[in-house]
Amino acid sequence: MVTPSWGALFGAVDELALPERSYPYSYQDLPLIKVFVYARIKGITGFQSLQKHLTIRPDVLALVGLEKVPHRKTIAARSRALSASVSSLLHQLTEQFIEAGEVDPGIGSVDSTLMHAQGNVWHKKQRDKGELPSCGNIDQEAHWGKSGCGEWVYGYRLHSLTLCGPEGITWPADISVQPANIKDADVLDDELIYQLTASTQVLLGDGGYDQESCYSNCDERKITLLAPIKVKKTRNLSVVKEPSFTKTPVSVRSLLYAKPPSNRFRVNLKTFSI
């Protein structure tokens, strides 16, 4: 049977204010959101598996507020349609949890992960020429992106902004799905940075956010961005000339790496006096 904790979780979903739609659906948004939350926690990843699970669990079906089990194609279509409302829902939930003291907005982190596009792959040479493969089933909105491990993926990149939740659990404050070729720093500057509260003091990120624009935007909001310096080696190290010690000594680092912006090292020490 379903435990009472599910009722408390779904009760929080009922308090969300969803945007009004211009035309009605056969299945309302709130019950399906509860279904997707349930599937995520239970680890149910396939739409067909979710349909079968709801068929043999009428107690769950009643708790989420559905009278019948939606078809797997309906579940898949509504999952894509609801993705536009996920960001708004996260903002509302985050505000509620911050007011309740369950989420600490003082420390945040930002990161991204690559996701493969469904269907066949559109190879880069053909994509650059605008030639669609004869195999069909190509996601034309997806793009090529490179992971931190050097792997090339045709698909999308999920960008997430998280805060510190109860018992060290990360709480998703905002998400953004972009083609895989969109840089992490651009998404932070254009979208995610505006979801940080005035109480945020530290923002953690990887080398993808080591850009001057990210540091400047965080400085304007009095936020300390902590990110590793993303150095770039020269393509041909053989062209680096040995320093002449008759002149001002030059370090090897200055020859191999670009000079980092000065504000990368401007850490607000008051932040760490908590």
Image: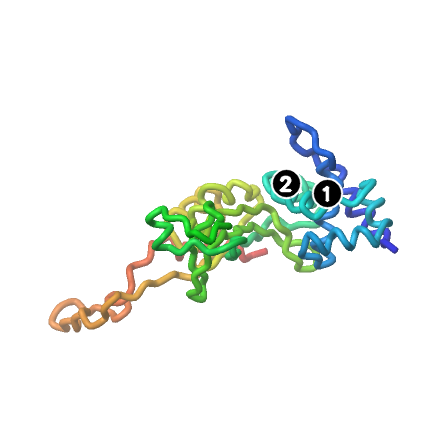
- Mark 2–mark 1 CB contact (< 8 Å): yes
Q: Position of residue 254 (x, y in %)?
A: 26, 65
Report if residue 257 is visible in the image.
yes
Q: Pick whichever, 121 or 106, lies toward us.
A: 121
Which residue is rendered at x = 61% and y = 43% of the image?
80
Q: Secondary structure at mark 1?
A: helix
Q: Secondary structure at mark 2?
A: helix
Q: Pick whichever, 203 or 175, lies toward us.
A: 175
Task: Specify the amino acid type for callout 2.
Answer: Leu
Residue 178 lies left or right of residue 6; in this view the side is left
Task: Specify the amino acid type for callout 1.
Answer: Leu
**Residue on which the image places disc 2:** 82
> Which numbered dot is residue 205?
none
Which residue is rendered at x = 43% and y = 52% of the image?
134
Q: Is residue 143 above or below residue 255?
A: above
**Residue on which the image places disc 1:** 32
